[in-house]
Image (cartoon, rainbow, N blue to C red):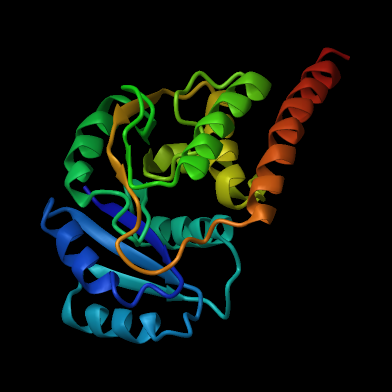
Amino acid sequence: MKAFVVIPTYNEKDNVASLSRAVLEQDADLQILFVDDNSPDGTGVIIDELVAQNNRIHVLHRTGKLGLGSAYREGFKAALAMGADYLFEMDADFSHDPKSLPSFLSAIKENDLVIGSRYLNGVSVVNWPIRRLILSYFASVYARWITGLQLRDCTGGFKCFRRSTIEAIDLSRVTSDGYSFQIEMNYRCMEKGLRIAEIPIIFVDRHAGTSKMSKSIVREAVLMVWKLRLGSIISRVMGKK
């Protein structure tokens, strides 16, 4: 089994070394693929040093800050080319606890996508400002209402996919970033009738660095759910003709 933890990075020099150790010690079959967007703080240089020291760590260097969704798309394609059986999404800032990785590996055996949910058992978020928490929670409510996703956490970014799931989705159809990338990936899985499960996680605000959240990311998510819903309706109508 090859399980690749795909981790996009931009200015995460204070986290990548300790995160690598924490991830790899969870299971001998785990490997890491960093996708670095030419971080000006030298994150890419530190990752190159980690790669030279450990053959379970890999890196994909990109020319600039090209977006979270494109980082995952390129990372997934690279991991598949290296023979990945399972692919994780994971943040670089320790908001996603590496100790949860074994729980994902257990759950993915019976599912096609496993989502780490912040809202499965109430609210499991630590150190977030109340405005950010309200935004995140109601973004999931909004996405469920528009798209029909039967998930408590539609926007969470701690996930594990089977290889066959990524291949079935067709990444060329997935064009969004940020919140909307997470929603779109979930929706594409639902469209295919794939098995989706949520497991509880505790989300802790980042250890170091700054948040990548922006107003444009929120706007994209608001529009994307309607695009997904209307696209599905049009496809069904065209299919009946």
Side (left or right) of 238 relative to 135: right
Rendered residue at 39%/86% (across/down): 42
Side (left or right) of 234 relative to 86: right
Rendered residue at 61%/43% (across/down): 180
Residue 59 in the image, given as x and y percentages of width and height: 37, 73
- Vertical position of residue 110 compared to residue 6: above or below: above
For this rendering, which residue is in front, 131 or 165? Answer: 131
Rendered residue at 29%/62% (across/down): 207
Residue 122 in the image, given as x and y percentages of width and height: 34, 23
Give the total number of marks visible in the rendering.
0
Rendered residue at 22%/44% (across/down): 101
Residue 236 in the image, given as x and y percentages of width and height: 77, 18
Could one spot residue 168 in this view of the protein?
no
Side (left or right) of 145 relative to 34: right
Residue 215 in the image, given as x and y percentages of width and height: 66, 54
- Vertical position of residue 103 compared to residue 240: above or below: below
For this rendering, which residue is in front, 239 or 119? Answer: 119
